[in-house]
């Protein structure tokens, strides 16, 4: 069993990365996480996923 971690600034980028990666893999589980923070007046989002696969 192996794991792969993805970390993107936009959810659409995360979706594209995951879809490309899982095409030829046997997926065991996918865990998603979203975090948000404020830097000055800017909101920063981080979309991440952990994929467990064989």
Image (tube, rainbow, N blue to C red):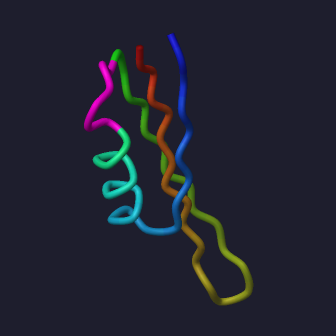
Q: Is residue 5 above or below residue 37?
A: above
Q: Is residue 27 above or below residue 34?
A: above
Q: Position of residue 11 (x, y in %)?
A: 37, 62
Q: How many marks?
A: 0
Q: Is residue 10 left or right of residue 46?
A: left
Q: Is-magenta flag for residue 26? A: yes
Q: Residue at x 28, y 47 (%)?
A: 19
What is the chief secondary structure element of the magenta stretch? loop
Residue found at the far front of this picture: 24
Q: Residue at x 50, y 33 (%)?
A: 50
Most foreground residue, 5 or 35:
5
Quadrant containing the C terminus in the rendered view: top left
Q: Is-magenta flag for residue 23? A: yes
Q: Residue at x 32, y 49 (%)?
A: 20
Q: Residue at x 66, y 74 (%)?
A: 38
Residue found at the far right of this picture: 40
Most foreground residue, 6 or 31:
6
Q: Position of residue 24 (x, y in %)?
A: 28, 31
Residue found at the far top of this picture: 1
Q: Is residue 25 above or below residue 28?
A: below
Q: Which residues are magenta?
A: 22-27
């Amino acid at each position: 069993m192996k794991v792969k971690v993805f970390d993107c600034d936009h959810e659409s980028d995360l979706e594209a990365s995951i879809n490309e990666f899982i095409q030829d893999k046997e997926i065991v589980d996918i865990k998603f996480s979203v975090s948000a923070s404020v830097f000055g007046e800017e909101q920063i989002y981080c979309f991440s996923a952990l994929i467990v696969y064989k």
